[in-house]
């Protein structure tokens, strides 16, 4: 029992950001469910989907011990845990590579299109870790991570169809925008709650409103052009109204824990809406979506 406690150190393995789990799992589930709408189901799709899920989870968990290991090599943190951080990093990296190798063996070579983007975001995360807590909590880092985890959606589409249809990028776009807007909204509400001047100053409030408005326009234009179902616009209309309400004046959160669970639930509900949009809102665009 003592050995297992030594091997498993929670802060080295489990990411502390609860929202990141939703940013990972919701795109994966949405992509896996709507994939048959975007292309023909390929052989052994269930196995490929399982490998994408396990590989994505391993890559997601890799960032925590890898960042800790990097900080320890710079003399920060408890250096006694450096071998353990290195071991977990290698274990997660090996698991991710094994899953990726299995996917290539199954003919999912279209995943190569996602490797560069995913690797770039991982390197960005390691760079942020060098900067310390300020770098890890920077807006650009959170936004990049939120958008990067949304790559699980097109990865799931490739697992099911063995192709990378153009519509898979549209699916990634709406999920990435959803995640990034959630980052902006949550940061604003928490800044109001904790009286952080840098997060709640007028420029930051205008940024939140502008980002939501631009996202709504982009999703609306993509829907009109037939790149994505037009029904996906509805949550972004709601997001825009919510952002305007939050930015109009300071809105402190009465209960941060309850607020966090509420945001997780909203993300899951929006993911379900996207699924319905692709099943029932893409009928008129099916010819466009399938190329």
Image (cartoon, helix red, strand yellow):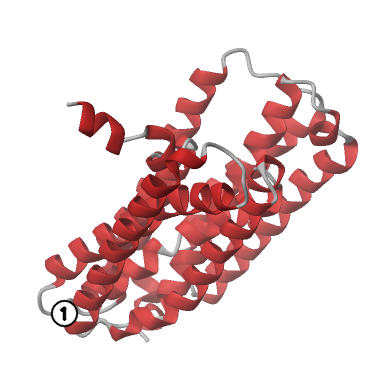
Q: Is residue 75 visible?
A: yes
Query: Which residue sits furthest top?
Result: 254
**Residue found 83% across the figure and 44% down from its top:** 206
Residue 61: x, y in percent?
A: 38, 50
Query: Which residue sits furthest left?
Result: 44
Is residue 232 found left or right of 268 in the rendered image? right
Is residue 145 found left or right of 8 in the rendered image? right
**Mark 1 crowdedness (10 Å alpha carbons): few <14, some 14-19, many ≥20:** some
Count of all numbered marks drawn on residues in the image: 1
Is residue 2 found left or right of 228 in the rendered image? left
Establish if 82 lies above or below 172: above
On-image quarter of the N terminus: top left
**Residue found 58% across the figure and 49% down from its top:** 71
Query: Which residue sits furthest right?
Result: 202
Residue 37: x, y in percent?
A: 28, 70
**Residue found 67% across the figure and 45% down from its top:** 132
Foreground pick, 192 / 221: 192
**Residue found 70% across the figure and 19% down from its top:** 252
Foreground pick, 225 / 146: 146
Establish if 148 lies above or below 142: below
Residue 100: x, y in percent?
A: 27, 73
Quarter of the image for residue 246 reads top right
Q: Is residue 251 visible?
A: no
- Residue designated by label 1: 42
Element under label 1? loop
Foreground pick, 126 / 32: 126
Quarter of the image for residue 58 reads bottom left
């Amino acid at each position: 029992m003592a050995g297992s406690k030594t091997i498993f150190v929670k802060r080295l393995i489990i990411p502390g950001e609860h929202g990141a789990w939703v940013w990972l799992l919701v795109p994966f589930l949405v992509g896996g469910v709507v994939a048959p709408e975007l292309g023909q189901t390929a052989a052994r799709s269930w196995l490929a989907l399982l490998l994408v899920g396990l590989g994505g989870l391993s890559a997601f968990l890799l960032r925590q011990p890898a960042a800790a290991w990097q900080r320890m090599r710079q003399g920060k943190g408890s250096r006694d845990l450096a071998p353990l951080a290195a071991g977990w990093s290698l274990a997660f990296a090996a698991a991710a590579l094994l899953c990726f190798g299995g996917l290539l063996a199954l003919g999912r070579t279209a995943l190569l299109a996602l490797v560069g983007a995913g690797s770039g975001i991982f390197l960005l995360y390691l760079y942020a870790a060098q900067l310390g807590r300020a770098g890890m909590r920077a807006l650009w880092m959170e936004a990049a991570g939120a958008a990067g985890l949304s790559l699980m959606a097109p990865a799931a589409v490739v697992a099911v169809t063995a192709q990378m249809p153009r519509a898979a990028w549209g699916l990634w776009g709406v999920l990435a925008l959803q995640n990034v807007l959630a980052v902006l909204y949550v940061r604003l509400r928490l800044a109001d709650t904790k009286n952080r001047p840098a997060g709640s100053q007028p420029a930051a409030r205008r940024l939140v409103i502008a980002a939501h408005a631009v996202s709504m326009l982009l999703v609306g234009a993509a829907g009109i052009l037939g790149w994505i179902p037009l029904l996906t616009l509805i949550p972004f209309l709601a997001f825009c109204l919510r952002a305007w309400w939050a930015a109009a004046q300071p809105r402190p959160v009465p209960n941060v824990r309850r607020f966090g669970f509420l945001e997780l639930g909203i993300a899951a509900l929006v993911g379900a809406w996207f699924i319905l949009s692709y099943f029932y809102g893409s009928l008129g665009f099916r010819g466009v979506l399938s190329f």
